[in-house]
Amino acid sequence: MTEPVTTRASFPDGFSWGTATAAHQIEGGNWNNDWWRHEHQPGTLCAEPSGDACDSYHRWAEDADLVASLGFTDYRFSVEWSRVEPAPGEWSVAALDHYRRICDGLTARGVNPVVTLHHFTTPRWLADLGGWESADTVERFATFCEKVAVALGDVMTRACTINEPNVVAFYGWSFGVFPPGKRDPDLADRVTRTFIDAHRAAVEAIRTAAPGVPVGLTLSMSDWAAVGDGDDRTRAEAKLARYREFMEDRFLAATEGDDFIGVQAYSRARVGPDGVLRTGEEGVPMLPMGYELWPQALEATLRRAWEVTGGRVPLLVTENGIGTDDDDQRISYVERALEGVLRAIADGVDVRGYTYWSLLDNFEWVFGYRPKFGLVSVDRTTFERTPKPSAAWLGEIARAGTLPGDA
Ligand code: GCO
């Protein structure tokens, strides 16, 4: 496929430039959640346990220094529910204070704290009570959001309710590789509905406790493509429509009235008559994550989110990135993705910011520490952080508000 020529232009004034992490992937020692248990259970696909991760629970100030010195305006991180509410109804003041210190520390460095309330992990006790299969979790999550919003309301600049609920529902209950490792489409459907209700309840709880803080959902989206000819093509298209409905459209419909939609895109999903294909198109490289190197995904998903929601809610790229050992490949992937963002903006899509996943090489869930998404590498023994060339490259774009070569 030939790509359209980009009309190079600057990003709009006030466009935010961030980098993201998530508690379980960087903090270390999060033994009280469902993922930790999953990592230690025999028979899962997990490559290795998360262990100390990047020790960011203790080294958050070093991370904040990096974000600020590289030139980013925003840092998106998540609060770990199992630390804040280690047992039902038991709230840790110390944990909330910890996250408040991070927000204050970022602000002092000139960086906006963007807080995610749920990023894949659920307290063990809650998982044991049925977790997202139980409608009771909606209220428990709203209460948790309220506690966090009360504690951080005056120091966070944006709140993301639930990170990729579609991925959690699909991989946890349909595909069976995330906790709780089930393969039951009806349960996956029920979990999806719980997530949607929980998102709405969380928006309300956060708006009440922290008025004025923009709040939204962050959704994993793919550039879906049907392949095949004739009847096969027709069947592929029907399948694609069902996937999209399950993975994306139901969630997009639930963002009505939100302050932003967080679009998260990495690659493309090719669908044949029997489902998602595991092989890439000839000539398109496959990444170690098992999907195609497809920077076009970001532009496609931004345009689709905008179209499906009728342009009623502004968009933010809350994640985009690439797991690769080749940092030049990272730079060219991000550059192409950003060109797509500029094209979408030029066509009137209201995109307010770009967030690279991730600041650090970190715990990539089932894959363990093998995939390297970070702008900064982390020594697995000393935890020493070393910025890669892509970190300075993207930081410079953030400072300038234009792609290299543009005036
Ligand atoms: C997400 C994931 C991140 C992953 C990233 C790379 O929000 O998509 O939660 O945690 O690390 O997507 O696969």
Image: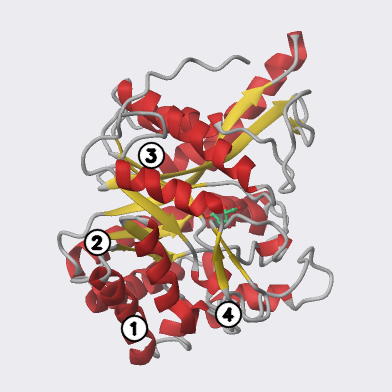
Residue 119, percent from left and from top: 49, 64
> Which marked residue is nearer to the observer: mark 2 or mark 3?
2
Horizontal side of 283 relative to 399 (left or right) equals: right
Look at the numbered disc 1 and say if its residue's Cβ is closer than 8 Å to ligand 1.
Answer: no
Label for residue 253?
Answer: 3
In which quadrant is the N terminus drawn? top right
**Residue type at numbered disc 2:** Thr
Which numbered disc flags the more N-terminal residue, 2 or 4? 4
**What residue sits right under mark 1 in the picture?**
96
**Residue type at numbered disc 1:** Leu
Mark 4 touches mark 1? (CB < 8 Å)? no
Between the residue at mark 2 and the residue at mark 4, the CA separation in whole angstroms equals 25 Å
Residue 136, percent from left and from top: 44, 70
> Which marked residue is nearer to the observer: mark 3 or mark 4?
4
Residue 48, percent from left and from top: 76, 71
Between the residue at mark 2 and the residue at mark 1, the CA separation in whole angstroms equals 16 Å
Residue 125 is drawn in which quadrant? bottom right
**What residue sits right under mark 2 in the picture?**
157
Q: Secondary structure at mark 4?
A: loop
**Residue type at numbered disc 3:** Ala
**What residue sits right under mark 4 in the picture?**
28
